[in-house]
Amino acid sequence: MIIKPRTRGFICLTSHPDGTAQNIKNQIDYVKKQGTFQGPKKVLVIGASTGFGISSRITAAFGAGAATIGVFFEKPTAPGKPGTAGWYNSAAFEKEAQAAGLYAKSINGDAFSDEVKQQTIDLIKKDLGQIDLVVYSLASPRRTHPKTGVAYSSVLKPIGQPFTNKTVDFHSGVVSDISIAPIESQEDIDNTIAVMGGEDWKFWMEDLHKAGVLAPNVQTVAYSYIGPELTFPIYRNGTIGQAKNDLEATATTIDQILSNINGKAYVSVNKALVTQSSSAIPVVPLYISLLYKVMKDKNIHEGTIEQMYRLFNERLYTTDGQVPVDEQGRIRIDDWEMRDDVQAEVSKLWNEATTENLEEISDIKGYRDDFFNLFGFNFDNIDYDAETNEVIEIPSIQ
């Protein structure tokens, strides 16, 4: 069938198998060009199909030669019905990994559930024995608690007072003001923490440890974000930020769980990038389009694959075995974004940004391209007017 992009707000409703395969190939080629490093050998990635998750899997596999298991929840393909981008990403990754002689298997299901956790444990026992790295990169707006059956939905709101600032419709380039009402009750915070906090990461590590599938000296890493002060009211000081605080605090709890096997948990604070999650946050698309402009001009821009390669090669797996962290024990791979000179220039451009000058002072085009690349569109070498086979299977999922 012929597949074109169809969007609704910050969501692209279609994805292209050839374009997503190109996206995966580009990331693999980047890692190969950087060269191999001494890293993990048996890796579980939870939330492995898009964004930082798929880039983590690519980095581990093609940078360190690791066997990888990926867990995700994606819509499979069917005749006349394209699958989700994450489904196509995972299919392309497995194909490339197997061609390179690398073990790669995937599990498609609700990672919050006990059933998927057990299915993953069984696969590790059968094929790998033990794993030495667990990447937790799960992003979802909803979670059904595996113990109580209660369904929670996260909310994106400020706390205490309304938040008003600039935002942009990245499709049209129209800059406007947006106002977001604050939370109505503590329940909004609690629900968001239940979905996006650290409890599920802890459940995973407890279950994996109890099952004996974690190797001595195992490491686990989850991803977070802090960002600049201008986004604090809606992000770090809002409901999402409360969930991220909980996630970061959970690393200490997991350290205690893994203490008898000398395991260690880290939270990596990553750079602001175009992902399916970040596109949904008001203010953030405008900030990212300005940030891209500044960082590209300084030749320090990174996408998810560049971020993950630097995280693995320069932070998690250093030659001296020491993982550099900040005073809160977090890995700061957002260090280039948060440089004083970068933030000063972004703040200046933020104050100047209007609909009329946005194309000139920002990289809104780069934002759009990155957004559509997530779904396999806007690649110059793909003929989007041509018929493509929408039915793509993931080799390890029957």
Image (tube, rainbow, N blue to C red):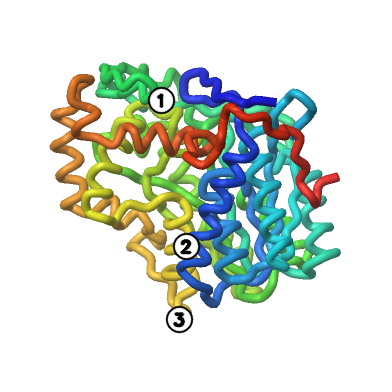
Give the CA separation, mark 2 to mark 3: 15 Å
- Residue 309, numbered circle: 2
Where residue 12 sits, quadrant-wise, is top right
x and y percent of residue 177 in the render?
Answer: 26, 17
Residue linked to disc 1: 157
Where residue 241 sits, quadrant-wise, is top left
Query: Tag 3's secondary structure?
Result: loop
* Furthest-bottom residue in this view: 320
Looking at the image, tell me whether mark 2 or mark 1 is earlier in sequence order.
1
Q: Is residue 171 left or right of residue 386?
A: left
Relative to 265, does residue 247 appear above or below in the rendering? above
Quadrant housing the C terminus: top right
Number of numbered markers = 3
Q: Is residue 64 left or right of residue 293?
A: right
Relative to 140, does residue 156 appear above or below in the rendering? above
Near-viewer residue (100 or 278): 100
x and y percent of residue 196 in the render?
Answer: 54, 39
Q: Residues within 10 Å of mark 3 (few under 14, many from 20)?
A: few
Please name the residue shown 61% across and 36% down the image. Answer: 85
Near-viewer residue (263 or 314): 314
Q: Residues within 10 Å of mark 1 (few under 14, many from 20)?
A: many
Q: Nearer the viewer, mark 2 or mark 1?
A: 2
Mark 2 is on which residue type? Tyr
Mark 3 is on which residue type? Thr
Please name the residue shown 26% across and 37% down the image. Answer: 290
Instruction: Examine the rendering and report whether any part of residue 194 can be seen.
Output: no
- Residue 319, numbered circle: 3
